[in-house]
Amino acid sequence: MPIFYCFWGKLNNIKRYEIINSLAKINQADTYLEVGVKGGHTFSKITITNKTAVDPIFRFNFKSMDKRFHQTTSDEFFLEAVS
């Protein structure tokens, strides 16, 4: 089993966005990229100002939000980023 799954299994009372926000604060992160946003549950709770979301089918109204949203596959997103 990958260590990532073991880590989440032991911290099942802590929400993913809490861990991400804590790590972002410790590292003074000013950007956040989430690939596979789906319904935006984690993404919406991330406190980093400069957020980018990538998903081929967002399951919420992302057009009314004030962040960068890319409705595309991750392959297409990264291909465009490097070209």
Image: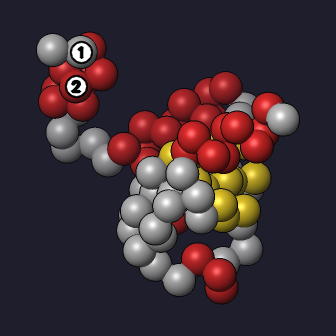
Label 2: which residue?
5
Circle 1 crowding by C-alpha within 10 Å: few under 14, some 14–19, many from 20: few
Q: Quadrant of the C terminus?
A: top right
Quadrant of the image occupied by residue 53:
bottom right
State if disc 1 and disc 2 touch (CB < 8 Å).
Answer: yes
15 or 3: nearer the eye?
Answer: 3
From the viewer's perspective, is 43 left or right of 69? Answer: left
Tally the marks: 2
Label 1: which residue?
2
Quadrant of the image occupied by residue 28:
top right
User: Please, what secondary structure does the residue beneath circle 1 have?
Assistant: loop
User: Please, what secondary structure does the residue beneath circle 2 have?
Assistant: helix
Give the vertical position of 25 relative to 77 (above or below): above
> What is the three-letter code of the residue carrying label 1?
Pro
Residue 31 x %, y %: 73, 42
63 or 77: nearer the eye?
Answer: 77
> What is the three-letter code of the residue carrying label 2?
Tyr
Circle 2 crowding by C-alpha within 10 Å: few under 14, some 14–19, many from 20: few
Q: Quadrant of the N terminus?
A: top left
Residue 46 appearing in the image? no
Give the vertical position of 76 relative to 11 (above or below): below
